[in-house]
């Protein structure tokens, strides 16, 4: 069933329910504009907020095979003002229950997101499970405008990509309730996925990869896809993805599919300094051997496991040091972990946690295990 058919089916079901009680009728449903998602930018002309709304076009009815859309942009001093004034353009009340995405420009994110998302968290008609993104393009509107190229409702596509992100682990999956919750939590900074326009063979598509890092409600930096994967390992949020491992000569040769992962954080005091011990245990399958010889002479499964473990330890440490030195942002929830497991220590450091986090001594111990080599244990052999 297409996205549009699902949306309309839900609306018809609601219509029938309220028709029985005599509280609603079809005319009222038809007078609503269904919001799929929004993009929030800064209007260059006057410096005000610019809201672009992606609306589902239901004029085609249930037998329409392709979901339609409409785009409306309006600027204003506050988001609530803009949302209400859009009604004067559409002639219909905005229906928010099916909204799936909020995309904000990097410019807005770096100035502070409270002014852009507070209205959404307070409005009684909006939902808290909408996904939030930061645009890697100059504006957030550019991403929504891809619907004119792909002929698809972009907000719905982005939501589906977030549901499938567990197979990649290159971007965090963040709903707006979770983002706001971390804004209000000491010892756990907010993050959001980055969304870009990917161009290949003159075809443009959305691509979600990387992380926007926040201190309070202001974006302070970015992580790429590989750094994001390391972050997700630390936060015990990896459920899938691939580890690319080199052979003993440094040539990329093996692909390990992540089957499962378990990460443990252990805060403790060592020689008068707060220390965080990180332990990861990752189960994988050997899914690709990119050499004609297969395992090179003297190369064993244990050798690959050892290199994968060392690589993961190095990547995690490099990321943590980068975030400590450049951003002072506890995106790993170390502070929250100290609070839960060492409350006495937390009482001493909570009032200056950003400084304590930057000075935190971190050790990493990673173990990667290869459980299987898929359907075959040998390489493809070429004939003469």
Image (cartoon, grey):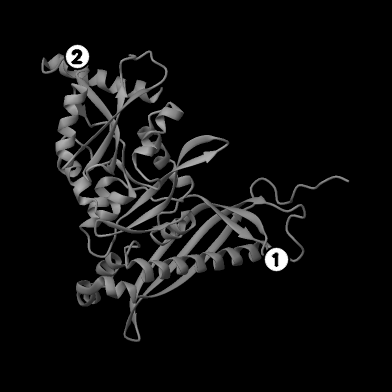
Among the two numbered marks 2 and 1 on one chain, the one whose residue lies closer to the N terminus: 2
Asked if 228 appears above or below 324 in the picture, the reply is above
Residue at (47%, 53%) from the top-left corner? Answer: 225
Quadrant of res 77: top left
Residue 230 % position (x, y): 46, 60
Instruction: Tell which of 97 and 67 is nearer to you.
Output: 67
Residue 15 % position (x, y): 21, 18
- Residue under label 1, please give it: 249
| Horizontal side, residue 310 vs residue 58: left or right | right
What kind of element bears circle 1? Answer: loop
- Residue under label 2, please give it: 26
Q: Which numbered dot is residue 196?
A: none
Q: Quadrant of the N terminus?
A: top left
Residue at (31%, 85%) from the top-left corner? Answer: 272
Callout 2 touching callout 1 (CB < 8 Å): no
Residue at (77%, 55%) from the top-left corner? Answer: 293
The residue sitting at the front extreme is: 45
Count neighbours of disc 2 (C-alpha within 10 A) and say few if under 14, some if 14 to 19, many if 20 or more.
some
Residue 294 % position (x, y): 74, 55
């Amino acid at each position: 069933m297409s996205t549009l058919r699902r949306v309309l089916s839900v609306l018809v079901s609601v219509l029938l329910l309220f028709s029985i009680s005599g509280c609603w009728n079809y005319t009222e449903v038809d007078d609503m504009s269904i919001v799929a998602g929004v993009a929030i930018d800064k209007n260059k002309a006057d410096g005000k907020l610019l809201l672009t709304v992606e609306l589902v076009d239901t004029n085609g009815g249930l037998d329409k095979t392709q979901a339609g859309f409409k785009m409306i942009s309006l600027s204003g001093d506050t988001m609530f003002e803009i949302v209400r004034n859009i009604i004067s353009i559409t002639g219909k009340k905005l229906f928010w229950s099916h909204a799936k995405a909020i995309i904000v420009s990097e410019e807005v994110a770096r100035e502070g997101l409270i002014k852009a998302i507070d209205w959404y968290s307070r409005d009684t008609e909006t939902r808290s499970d909408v996904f939030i993104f930061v645009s890697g393009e100059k504006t957030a509107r550019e991403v929504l405008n891809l619907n004119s190229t792909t002929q698809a409702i972009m907000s719905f596509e982005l939501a589906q990509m977030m549901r499938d992100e567990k197979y990649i682990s290159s971007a965090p999956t963040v709903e707006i309730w979770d983002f706001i919750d971390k804004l209000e939590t000491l010892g756990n900074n907010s993050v959001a996925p980055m969304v870009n326009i990917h161009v290949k063979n003159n075809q443009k598509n959305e691509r979600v990869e990387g992380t926007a890092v926040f201190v309070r409600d202001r974006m302070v930096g970015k992580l790429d896809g590989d750094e994001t994967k390391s972050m997700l390992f630390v936060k015990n949020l990896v459920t899938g993805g691939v580890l690319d491992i080199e052979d003993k000569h440094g040539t990329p040769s093996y692909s390990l599919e992540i089957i499962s992962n378990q990460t443990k954080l252990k805060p403790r005091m060592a020689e008068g300094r707060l220390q965080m011990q990180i332990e990861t245990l990752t189960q994988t399958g050997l899914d690709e051997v990119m050499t004609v010889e297969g395992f090179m002479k003297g190369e064993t499964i244990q050798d690959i496991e050892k290199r994968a473990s060392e690589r993961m330890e190095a990547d995690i440490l490099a990321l943590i040091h980068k975030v400590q030195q450049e951003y002072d942002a506890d995106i790993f929830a170390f502070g929250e972990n100290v609070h839960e497991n060492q409350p006495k220590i937390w009482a001493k450091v909570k009032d200056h946690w950003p400084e304590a986090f930057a000075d935190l001594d971190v050790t990493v111990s990673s173990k990667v295990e290869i459980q299987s080599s898929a359907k075959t244990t040998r390489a493809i052999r070429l004939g003469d």
